[in-house]
Image (cartoon, helix red, strand yellow):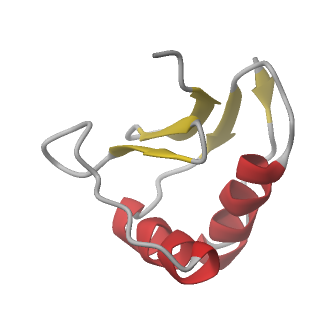
Amino acid sequence: MLVLTEPVNQSRLNACVYDQLNYNMNGDVAIPGEWDCYDTLGYLERRLKQSIIATLADDGSKFAVKGKIIVFEPDSVYISHYNA
């Protein structure tokens, strides 16, 4: 698992998550810190110009985008490939 350094603010996290969606990586990525999943979800919807329904977890903290799973935990954000 690749562990990135903690971004300085929510905007930087949003950009980092967006970039990770476009990288062709096989492993998992962790981004430490406590983050707002709804802010990131809104950012991704604006950048990707599509609606994203966060249905993988009741609280909206886990969703699938562009073949990857994004999970917001209390201490980190995890991005991994979606294996159906």
Q: Is residue 25 above or below residue 67?
A: above
- Image coordinates for residue 58, horizontal then vertical, percent: 13, 43
Q: Residue furthest left?
A: 58
- Image coordinates for residue 50, horizontal then vertical, percent: 47, 73
At x 35%, y 68%, the residue is 38
- Image coordinates for residue 17, horizontal then vertical, percent: 67, 56
Quadrant in which the N terminus is drawn: top right
Query: Is 5 left, or right, of 57 in this rendering?
Result: right
The residue closer to the viewer here, 60 or 2, is 60
Q: Is residue 60 above or below residue 13?
A: above
Q: Residue furthest right?
A: 24
Q: Quadrant of residue 80?
A: top right
- Image coordinates for residue 3, horizontal then vertical, percent: 77, 30
The residue closer to the viewer here, 79 or 34, is 79
Query: Is 41 left, or right, of 15 in this rendering?
Result: left
Q: Quadrant of residue 44?
A: bottom right
How many discs appear? 0
Query: Is 51 left, or right, of 16 in this rendering?
Result: left
Quadrant in which the C terminus is drawn: top left
The residue closer to the viewer here, 41 or 31, is 41
At x 47%, y 53%, the residue is 34
Q: Quadrant of residue 30?
A: top right
Query: Is 12 left, or right, of 59 in this rendering?
Result: right
Q: Is residue 10 above or below residue 3?
A: below
At x 65%, y 73%, the residue is 9
At x 84%, y 29%, the residue is 25
